[in-house]
Image: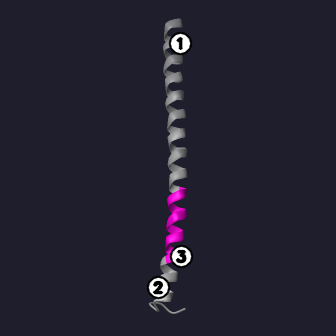
Amino acid sequence: MLEMLRAIRATQEKHSNDLLEIKERLGFLEQQYASISTRLDRMDLRVLRIEKRLDLVEA
């Protein structure tokens, strides 16, 4: 019985470590997404300004 509990504990520890790694990687992906989203927003504003200068859209 004690060996079974040790095996369960070892498995649980492995799952905890895997979950921690997944959370870290997800956090990194969220940061990258936020950075890309911000850059796209800025590009959108720049394109709009260019379109206005070229009279491609109404001001």
Query: Looking at the image, is mark 3 or mark 1 nearer the viewer?
Result: 3
* Residue type beneath disc 1: Leu
Residue shown at the point (53%, 6%) measured from the top left: 2
Neighbour tally class for label 2: few under 14, some 14-19, many 20 plus, Cα within 10 Å: some
Residue shown at the point (50%, 59%) measured from the top left: 36
Q: Position of residue 52 (x, y in %)?
A: 50, 88
Q: Mark 1 sits on what residue?
A: 5
The answer to which quarter of the image holds residue 23 is top right
* Residue type beneath disc 3: Leu
Residue shown at the point (48%, 82%) measured from the top left: 50
Neighbour tally class for label 1: few under 14, some 14-19, many 20 plus, Cα within 10 Å: few
> Of marks 3 and 2, which one's residue comes earlier in the chain?
3
How far is mark 3 from mark 2, CA to CA? 10 Å
Q: Position of residue 58 (x, y in %)?
A: 51, 93
Q: Are marks 1 and 2 in contact (CB under 8 Å)?
A: no
How far is mark 3 from mark 1, CA to CA? 60 Å
Evaluate whether residue 17 shows in this view: yes
Q: Nearer the viewer, residue 15 or 57?
A: 57
Q: Are marks 3 and 1 in contact (CB under 8 Å)?
A: no
Q: Quadrant of the C terminus?
A: bottom right
Q: Secondary structure at mark 2?
A: helix
Q: Is residue 44 magenta?
A: yes
The magenta-colored residue range is 34-46
Q: Mark 2 sits on what residue?
A: 51
Residue shown at the point (54%, 33%) measured from the top left: 20
Magenta region's main secondary structure? helix
Q: Mark 3 sits on what residue?
A: 45
> Of marks 3 and 1, which one's residue comes earlier in the chain?
1
